[in-house]
Image: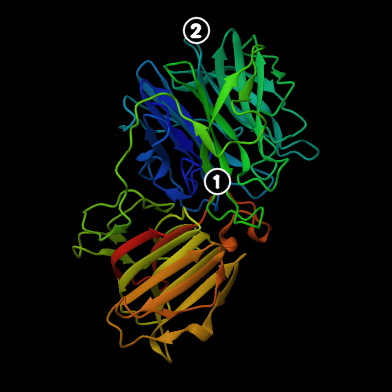
């Protein structure tokens, strides 16, 4: 019995979807950028219900992200399947803010979606958004956008393709330039499909901001030339900045066994009234699409705007158990939804076994670090939610801190932390960083030297954030006046970021004494 897909299907920071069907199973792989483990895969059997299945890159030997810039690292994974083998391509972006882009495109394979995955093989570095096309003749082809750093040249210099040799696990033969894109520019995210004698090239255009779109081109020949859909784009929100979804683009297609076609794509849900502030990050939605008689792709509901709800395929419902809101840290290992920054979970800094029932973090570098932070986080997925924890911590100096953090990147965060100073002893207060400028909410700092435990929470309501603290979890003290959630957005301060806001717990010891902080639980509760 058919039901309804409610968009976005993956809320919070889940960008750049790569959509794949294998038999009766559907998978979406999404970008993780500097958050580790890298590349997240969600699973569904009805396109309505989705659950997190795995994160693929779990060791530094697979992806060494230490020192990578914020909004760099793991971009746009491409998941595919052929003859019993899963293929996963991803880009590790080592630099992104200068004229150059240092790009490492890797391929890994596995016999099952849960792995084990092979060691990564670096294929090229000419651009990002790699995609592996498995042609009906048995050949395999790597596509990516090509980056051009030269003056008076477009940075996006076309979609290129080169043959991949699975025996040598390397690229071979000439590089073919397939497509220069449309006047919308910023042509990236190539996906190649075969249907009814055509090769169809689906691309993202207009940049990943408000002008984002999905464009289709086709050719009778694999190497082109490719003709652009005369009624392009297939989908965009660029013409309606009041629409509930924005930045719709980066499409990826699947066909159901019954011959229905669906497209996964990214989108954002700005804070109401702001138009552009999107602290939840780029999310994943699904649209039903249809082919016209003359062989072009259209949204099934008509027009160019994505639909908020979509008719699902006629498949048996397949719900998954709800994930718990509270984690009492009673397991021996950290799993979903937690991630760290750039480095894998390691007993040297994070442990669930040293003190059963508690998560222990050893303080390391500051929240500005691109190397060795002790931070465990999860995406913020709602505009109305409460995040809370309970901390036991005995700091000796102002260089030792631990607490609850709402974090976008090393330049933008809010942090309710326990620390110590020469006047108050152990004290509690909020610090922040906005567009790289550090500040302290000093009037709200309080002495807590008589507290045995520190209950901390952050309440998000629309655009407002409030932090609270309590010695017993019953009587709460406000630690700030309302703070702006919009700070934790891609566009804040003129930056061009690609991630989303996280809620987490962290610890620092800037004197490198590895002071331990013990967290009794972590809870993320929707309003």
Q: Badge 1, how many Cα within 10 Å: few under 14, some, many 20+?
A: many
Q: Position of residue 153 (x, y in %)?
A: 77, 36
Please tell me how many numbered marks the rendered image carries. 2
Q: Nearer the viewer, residue 99 or 285?
A: 285
Q: Which residue is mark 1?
A: 282
- Classify residue 517 by image quadrant: bottom left
Return the mark for residue 137: 2
* Discs 1, 2 touching: Cβ within 8 Å: no
Pointer 1 or 2: first along the chain: 2
How far from the left and from the top, in percent, is residue 327?
A: 28, 58
Specify the farthest residue to the right. 152
Q: Answer above or below: position of 506 versus 172.
A: below
Please state which of residues 126 and 260 is positioned toward the viewer in this rendering: 260
In 3D space, how far apart are the residues under numbered discs 1 and 2 (Cα atoms)? 36 Å
In the rendered view, would you say 11 is above or below 372? above
Residue at image point 52% right, 86% down: 443
Residue 245 placement (x, y as % from top left): 60, 44
Relative to 272, 6 lies left or right: left
SS for dot 1: loop
The C terminus lies in quadrant: bottom left
Give percent across and percent down for residue 283: 52, 44
């Amino acid at each position: 019995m058919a039901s309804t897909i409610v968009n976005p299907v993956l809320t919070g920071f889940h960008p750049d979807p790569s959509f794949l069907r294998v038999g009766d199973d559907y998978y979406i792989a999404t970008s993780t950028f500097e958050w580790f483990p890298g590349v997240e895969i969600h699973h569904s059997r009805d396109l309505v219900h989705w659950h997190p299945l795995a994160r693929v890159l779990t060791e530094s030997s697979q992806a060494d992200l230490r020192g990578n810039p914020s909004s760099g690292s793991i971009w746009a994974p491409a998941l595919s399947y052929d003859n019993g083998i899963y293929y996963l391509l991803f880009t590790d972006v080592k630099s992104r803010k200068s004229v150059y882009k240092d790009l490492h495109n890797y391929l890994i394979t596995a016999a099952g979606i849960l792995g084990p995955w092979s060691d990564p093989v670096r294929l090229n570095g000419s651009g990002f958004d790699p995609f592996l096309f498995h042609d009906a003749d048995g050949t395999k082809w790597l596509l990516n956008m090509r980056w051009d750093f030269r003056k008076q040249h477009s940075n996006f210099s076309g979609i290129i393709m080169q043959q991949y040799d699975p025996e040598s696990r390397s690229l071979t033969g000439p590089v073919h330039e397939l497509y220069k894109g449309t006047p919308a520019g910023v042509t990236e995210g190539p996906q190649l499909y075969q249907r009814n004698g055509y090769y169809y090239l689906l691309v993202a255009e207009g940049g990943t901001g408000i002008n984002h779109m999905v464009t289709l081109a086709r050719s009778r020949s694999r190497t082109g030339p490719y003709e652009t859909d005369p009624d392009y784009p297939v989908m965009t929100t660029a013409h309606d900045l009041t629409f509930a979804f924005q930045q719709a683009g980066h499409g990826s297609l699947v066909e159901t066994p019954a011959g229905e076609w669906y497209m996964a794509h990214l989108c954002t849900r700005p804070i109401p009234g702001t138009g552009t502030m999107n602290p939840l990050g780029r999310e994943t939605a699904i649209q039903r699409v249809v082919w016209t008689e003359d062989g072009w792709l259209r949204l099934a509901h008509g027009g160019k705007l994505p639909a908020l709800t979509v008719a699902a395929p006629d498949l048996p419902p397949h719900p998954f158990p709800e994930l718990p809101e509270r984690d009492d840290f009673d397991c021996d290992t950290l799993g979903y939804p937690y991630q760290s920054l750039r480095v894998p979970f390691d007993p040297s800094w994070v442990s669930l076994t040293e003190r059963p029932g508690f998560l222990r973090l050893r303080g390391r570098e500051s929240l500005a670090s691109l190397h060795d932070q002790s931070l465990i986080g999860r995406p913020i997925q709602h505009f109305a939610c409460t995040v809370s924890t309970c901390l036991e911590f005995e700091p000796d100096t102002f260089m030792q801190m631990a607490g609850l953090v709402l974090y976008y990147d090393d330049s933008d965060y809010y942090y309710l932390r326990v620390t110590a100073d020469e006047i108050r002893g152990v004290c509690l207060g909020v610090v922040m960083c906005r567009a790289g400028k550090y500040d302290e909410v000093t009037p709200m700092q309080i002495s807590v030297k008589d507290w045995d435990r520190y209950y901390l929470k952050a309440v998000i309501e629309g655009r407002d954030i409030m932090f609270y603290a309590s010695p017993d979890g019953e009587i709460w003290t406000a630690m700030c006046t309302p703070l702006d959630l919009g700070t934790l957005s891609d566009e804040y301060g003129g930056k061009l970021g690609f991630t989303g806001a996280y809620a987490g717990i962290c610890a620092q010891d800037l004197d490198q004494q590895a002071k331990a902080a013990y967290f009794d639980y972590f809870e993320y509760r929707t309003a």
